[in-house]
Image (cartoon, rainbow, N blue to C red):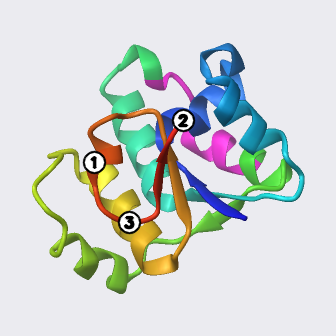
Amino acid sequence: MKYLLDTHILLWAAGEPECLSSEASAFIADEANELYFSAASLWEIAIKAGLGREDFQVDAGVFRRAALENGYVELPVEGRHAVAVQTLPNVHKDPFDRMLVAQAQVEGIILLTADGLVAQYPGPIRKV
């Protein structure tokens, strides 16, 4: 299966695996799964790290390189993803999360999230 990890799950998998649920850990550990991260997550990390957010204290460039070296697949943000954001119901105001939802819908990839609000969107989303 193909899974797009939301930004927090991605960060936890890399640096705080104890924050992951057992279900999320199992999805990530299963070598049969193809794990994706979005360029939007890198953008979110860069912006929030620059703002001094405690939960985003990582260099986006180093993080990207490590994710690729660990077998994650990078999903670029495309125009069709941006356009799909317009069709989303107004469940969540966070633009980064909205982009991840749109990417999952457009690409047909299951978005793994720990965020209950994100999980309320229709489409291929799984709260773990």
Amino acid at circle 1: Gln
| Residue 97 vertical position relative to residue 89 in the rendered view, above or below | above
Q: In the image, is residue 109 above or below residue 23?
A: below
Spot occupied by residue 76 in the image (x, y as percentages of width and height) = 52, 71
Location of the C terminus by quadrant is top right
Name which residue type carries label 2: Val
User: What kind of residue is marked 3?
Assistant: Gly
In the image, taking residue 17 as reference, residue 79 lies left or right, namely: left
Label 2, label 3: how far apart the Cα atoms are: 15 Å
Q: CA distance from mark 3 to mark 1?
A: 9 Å
Left or right for 87, reference 11: left
Please tell me whether mark 1 sits on a helix, a strand or a loop: helix
Q: Earlier in the sequence, mark 2 or mark 3?
A: 3
- The residue shown at (89%, 52%) is 31
Q: Tags 1 and 2 in contact by the CB under 8 Å rule? A: no
| Residue at the image point whose x is 60% and y is 39% from the top | 10
Which element carries disc 2, helix, strand or loop? loop
Residue matched to label 3: 123
Question: Which residue matches tag 2?
Answer: 128
Main secondary structure of the magenta stretch: helix
In front here: 95 or 111?
111
**Magenta span covers which residues?**
56-65
**In terms of secondary structure, where does tag 3 sit?**
loop
Mark 1 highlights which residue? 120
- Can you tell which quarter of the image residue 49 is in? top left
Q: Residues within 10 Å of mark 2 (few under 14, many from 20)?
A: some
Quarter of the image for residue 26 reads: top right
Classify residue 86 as left or right of residue 53: left
Other-residue count near label 3 (Cα within 10 Å), few / some / many at <14 / 14–19 / ≥20: some
> Residue 57 at what x, y percent from top left?
51, 22
